[in-house]
Amino acid sequence: MIRLAISEDMDTLIEIAEATGLFRPQELEELIGVMGAYFEGQFDEHHFWVVDEEDGEIVGVVYYAPEPMACHVWNTYFIAVREGWQRMGKGSELMGDVEEQVKRMGGRLLLVETSGLERYEQARRFYSQCGYDEETRIRDFYDEGEDKVIFRKAL
């Protein structure tokens, strides 16, 4: 069942994020800060943390919000599925829900940003399989030798 996350979910969401192994310590701290601010009501009503729950267990999570200073453009800032639930369509279901909700709210473009490092290849392949096109790469964005890859999908 896909539902909005609640503050009681936060520890589980952090656990899922840590388990990906994709975040540097400072990136994980930033994500936790954003998550905490969301649950404390510091963001407007157009920021969404959404979970996929199966039999009382959170198996996936996605965070999306409008892109600042852009007209009807949204960004999927974070998506992760528990390892035991990967390759079972859960990520695609979450992305489909994001697209449906963003479109319902008048969104016209949905962006996803990720790293160009080899260990992110699975994520980039996933976005492509969901119908996103690689729009651009910003060389050395995150660090020397680590590009930012931006995917785009017109809704």
Image: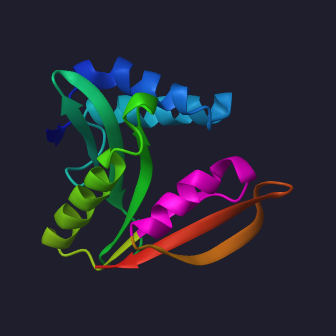
Magenta part, dominant SS: helix
Residue 5 visible to the viewer: no
The residue shown at (39%, 66%) is: 130
Foreground residue, 94 or 27?
94
Answer left or right for 119 relative to 66. right
Which corner quadrant holds the C terminus? bottom left
Asked whether residue 58 appears in the rendered view, the answer is: yes
Q: Say if 108 sits above or below 27 in the image.
A: below
Is 26 on the left or on the right of 76, as rendered? Answer: right
Quarter of the rendering occupied by the N terminus:
top left
Name of the residue lying farthest toward the right: 144
Q: Nearer the viewer, residue 72 or 76?
A: 76
Residue drawn 26% across the image and 58% down it: 98
Judge whether 153 appears above or below 3 on screen.
Answer: below
**Residue located at (61% from left, 36% from top):** 27
Q: Quadrant of residue 54?
A: top left
Is residue 117 covered in magenta?
Answer: yes
Point out residue 120 in the picture as x, y percentages from the top left corner. 64, 51
In front: 98, or 64?
A: 98
Q: Position of residue 52 (x, y in %)?
A: 23, 38
Residue name at image x 86 percent, y 55 percent: 144
Residue 32 x %, y % = 47, 29
Whole-percent x, y for residue 147 in the image = 74, 62
The reply to whether the magenta stretch includes residue 149 is no
Q: Nearer the viewer, residue 33 or 20?
A: 20
Q: Residue furthest front?
A: 88
Task: State how many labels appear.
Answer: 0
Write the start and end of the magenta stretch as one range: 111-130
